[in-house]
Image (cartoon, rainbow, N blue to C red):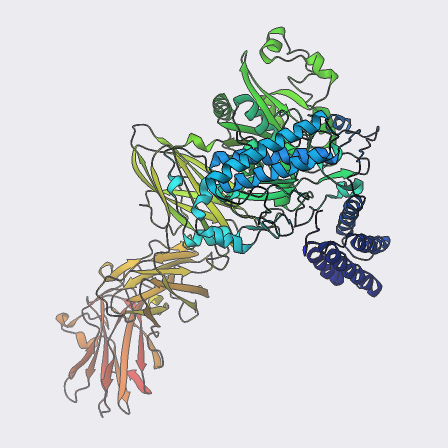
Amino acid sequence: MTNYPKESVCNEDRLLYRITLLKSSNQDTNKLYARAYTNACHAVKLDTNAKYKEAKDAYNNVIKNFSDLLLDKDNGMDRNKLIQKRNEYKHRVEQLERYMDGTKQTSFLYINENSPYQQRRDSCDSDIVRTEQDDYNDKAKFCYDQGELNESKGNMDHALEYYSEAAELYLKAFKLYENDSPEKLAARENFTRALDRAESLKKTTNLLSPMQPRTRSASNASDLRPSLSSFHQRSSSVSSVISVEPQCPTDDILTQKLSSTEIEVLKHTSSVNSKTFLPWMDEADLKEQFSYPNSKYLDPEGSLRLSDKQLEKFGGWKRPADIMKYPQLICLISSTSIIQDIVTDCSFVASLCVAAAYERKFKKQLITSCIYPQNKHGQPCYNPNGKYVIKLVYNGIARKIIVDDLLPVSREGTLMCTFSTNKGELWASIIEKAYMKLMGGYDFPGSNSGIDLHCLTGWIPEHIFISDKHFVADNVWDRILDGIKYGDVLVTIATGEMTEEEATEQGLVPTHAYAVIAIKDVLGKRLLQVKNPWSHKRWRGPYSHLDTQVWTDELKSCLNFDPDLAEKTDDGIFWIDFESVCEKFTSIHLNWNPELFTHRWVLHSVWPENVGPKKDVFSLHYNPQFSLRVNVPDKKPAAVWLLLSKHIMVTEENTDYITLHVYDNTSGERVYYPGTPFKEGTYVNSPHILVRFNAPPGISDYTIVVSQHEKEHSLYFSLRAYSLAPFKLKEVPMRYCVEKKIHSQWTEQTAGGNASNATYLNNPQWKITVLPTTSPVGILLMLEAPKDFAIHLMLVEGGKRAYSVSLRDILAESGPYRHGFCYSGEYTVVASTFEPELLGKFILTVASSVKLQVDAIPSEGAGMFKKVLHGEWIIGYSAMGCPSFGNYAKNPRYLLEIRELTTVKVRLQSINNTDSVPSMNVTIYEKHPTELFGKELATSGPYTNVIQGVATGDVVLSQNEMGYIIVLATHDKDVAAEYTAIVYSDRPVNIKTDK
C-alpha cells in the first residue's frame, strides 16, 4: 500500500493556509480553512501510520471543508489551488477504498462521444480488465530487465536485488494462477530463471541471500527527495556534471573540473520554482531505485499545478494501467503521433515532434535518451511501479527530474496532457510531465522551441529573427539545408501576432510554434514540411493542400505527397515554401548538434546585483568578462560559437535583456569602455544568447563581455564556447582586489573644467600614498559622473596640488574626455569636467593590489584669507617686461603690510587672453628704505605662459615697518593684458598699490 508522503500535504497546505489568511479578511473563512488545515494534517498522520479506514474518513472531512470554502466565490482565496488540493484528496480516498476492498478493482474509462479528442480512443482502452497477477508479472519482468541492465554495467549488488525481487514477484503471481494453467507454468519458469540468476550472482559476489529481506527502503515518502544535503554529497565529484555535453575523444570537457565558485553557482540555481533539481550524475543516477514491490511510486512533492483550462474539466489523476490495457513507454517514435492538448506548451510539443522526426530518420537516440529507466540496450522501458527519471539540461547542467506516472484526466475520461495516438504509448506524456514539473506546473506560461529543445537535448539554440536587418534569407536557407542533410540541426518556426481574420485566411495560429519535420530543395523550389502541434489546422497558402496549381505529378512524386488525400484528413501537417515562411512567420529556431565542434568548454558564473552600476552604457569595468585565445593551426579560419545561458530560478515572463559583446585586439585583458566591439550582441529577453564568428589562422585573443540592458537583480549564467580549433577560455578577474570609493562633487568653487581653463587648478584633487614595498604597485582609477558630463582623470607625480600640467608632468591619464565614465592606471589625482562650472556629484574609485592611502588635497589657499587684485599691463606705462629691459620697477607693484608672523602665497593669472597667454612672473621682495627693492623672498620661478598662471610658494613673512613689495611682470615689454592676482594669507594683511 502506498503511504501518502509525510509532510507533503501538510507543508503545501501550510503555505496555502498562510496565503489565505493574508488575503482573506473574513474571520469565518479563516476559521473554516484553519479547520481544513488541521483535518488535513490529521488525515496524513493516520495515513502514514497505516490507519487507512480512519484516514479515509478524515480525508472526506477535508474534502467537505474545501467544498464549503469553494461555495463562497468572494473569499479572496486561490480557487484553483483549492480545487486542485481537493481533487488530490479525492484521488487518495479512491486509492484507499481500492486497497481496503482487498483487491484492485477494475477501472473503466468512459469516452465522451462528443469529445473533440476522439483520436485518444486508440491510446485509451475502455474495456480494461487487469488482474493482480498482471501487476505482479509486469513488475517482475521490469525487475528482471533491470537486473540484466545492472549486471551488464557491473553493478552486481543492484543486479542481485532486482533478480531477487523479480523472483519474489513471479512467485506471488504463480500462487494466484489456477492450477496447470499456461500462465501458472510460465510464472514458475520465470521464477526459476530469476532465482537462478540471483543464486549465480550470490556465489560470485557473496552478498545478501536472494530471498532475504533487503535493507533498501521501499517507502517513497523520502525516496531521493531533492535536498541541499544530497547536493553537497555530489559536490565532491561535481565535475562529472559536465557529462551533459556530447562525448568525443577530443572534448576538453571530459577533463574539466569545476571551481568552488562554479559549484556554488550550480548549487544555488538548483532551486527552481521552489523545488530542488539535483545535477545528473551517470554513476549514481543509473542506480536509481525504480521498483516498489508492495506499492507504486507517488511523487513526495505532490501533484503538479493544473492550468485553468484543465481545472475546468479535471476529473482526477490516473495511472496508465488504470486507463490502458497494455501501457508501454515507446511503441513507435514518430512526430506524426504526438498531439498537444490544452496545455499551453506548443513550443515544447513542437520540440518533441522535431526530435522524434530526427530520431526516426537518422536511427539515433535523441529524445528517448533522456528517459529512465532503460533496459540493457539503452532503450527506455515502461515501469509498472510508476516512477520515471528524466534528464533535462537546465541552468547550466543536466539535471534529474523525478516524476510519477499519474496523468491528469478529464471528467469525461480523456487525457488532459500531450499524448500519442499510438496505442498505449506514454513517452510524450511522461517527458512533458517532467518538463512541466521543472517549469512549475501545467499552467506553463510558454517558451520557445529553441529553449525547449536545448533543455531536452542540450543542442545549441540559435534564434533567428526574420525581421532583423541582418537577416539574409538565402544564407539562412543554405545553412539549414546543409545542417539537415547531415543531421546536425533541428528546425522549428514560430508565428507572431496576427488578427483573427488573417489567421483564418492563412490557416495559421498566432504566436504559435511549429515543428519542421522535413526540408527539401527540389525542382528549384525550397520547401518545408511542417507540423502544427495541435495535429489539426493547416497552412492554406502556397504549396498547401489547397494550392492546386503547384502540385504537378513530378513534385508530388518528389515529395511523396498527395494533396487530394491530404485534404480528406486534417492532421496538422503541411508543406510550405521558404519564401512564405519568411513572409508569414517571425522566427526560425535552429538547434545545432554540439558534436559538430571538436573543442568545447563551459564556465559558470554570477554577476551580483550590487556589483557595478544599473546600466553599463559608459563603463564595462564591473561586467563579467572572459578571455578567449583561439589557436587556428590551419590556413582557413575556424568557427567559434559562444553561448550565454541565463539561469532561471522562477518561471515567469523573462524581462532581463542580456547579450554578449566580443572585443578583439585586447590581449584577452579587461575592457573598460564600451567602444565598438568586434561582434556586438543584440539585447533580447531570451535565456540563451548565441554569438558566432570565425577566428583567423594563427593565435587570436578576444575579450568576451556579458552585458545587461538594465540590471535589476543578480545574474547567474553559464558561458559555453564551441570551436573547430583549440582554445582557452577563462574568466578575467578584476585587475585589483583592493578598492576604495570616494564620493565627492564639483561645486561652484571646484568646477574648474579642463586644463585650458584658468580655473583648472580648482578641480578636486587627491594624494595617493603607496606604502613601502619591494614589488611594483599597479593603480586603477575610475571616475563615474552624470552621463552628460564629459569627464577626465589625470595622475601626476608629487602628491601635492597640481596647478597646471604639461606633458612631462603626466604619469597617466584616462585619454580624451568621455561622457559618464573614465579610468586611468599607475600621486596626485585630478578629476575634471571638460566644461567649467558644471556642478554635480561623482564617484572616484581607486583600486590596487595593495592597500593605499588616499587623502583629499585641500584647494589652494584652503583655510586662508584671500584678497583678489585686478589690473592690467598697459603699453608704455606698466607693460615693462622683465629686468632685462631696464624698467622692471615700473611693472604693477603692490605694498603688502602685515602685523604679525604670516604665511603668504600669491598667484598671478592673465585674463581674457586665453589665445596667447603672456609669459609671467610674480615675485615678493622686502621693501628697502632707499632702493627700489630689497631682498627677494619668494618667486614663481622662470617666466611661463601656463593658462592657470604662476604662483609663489608659501613664504613666512615677519612684521616690519617698511612692508613687502609684490611685483607682477611679463617677460616681454609692451604686452597689453589684464590680470588677476590672488593673495592668500593665514593672518589678515593689508594690500595697496605701491607708487
Left or right of 268 on screen, residue 166 = right
Number of numbered discs overlaid on the protein picture = 0
Q: Residue furthest top?
A: 553
Q: In this view of the protein, which residue sits in the foreground, 950 or 443?
A: 443
Image coordinates of residue 686 in percent, x first then y, are 55, 42
- Residue 494 in view of the camera: no
Left or right of 51 on screen, residue 895 = left
Image coordinates of residue 386 in percent, x first then y, are 66, 40
- Residue 896 in view of the camera: yes
**Residue 926 occupies which quadrant of the picture?**
bottom left
Up-down relation of residue 264 to residue 958 (above or below): above
**Quarter containing the C terminus:** bottom left
The residue at the point 79 percent across, 43 percent down is 102
Q: In this view of the protein, which residue sits in the foreground, 141 or 177?
A: 177
Image coordinates of residue 973 in percent, x first then y, are 19, 67
**Residue 10 occupies which quadrant of the picture?**
bottom right
Image coordinates of residue 951 in percent, x first then y, are 26, 73
Up-down relation of residue 369 to residue 783 (above or below): above
Up-down relation of residue 809 to residue 63 (above or below): below
Q: In this view of the protein, which residue sits in the foreground, 388 or 941?
A: 388
The residue at the point 68 percent across, 54 percent down is 8
Left or right of 186 on screen, residue 232 = left
Up-down relation of residue 249 to residue 441 (above or below): above
Q: In this view of the protein, which residue sits in the foreground, 340 or 984?
A: 340
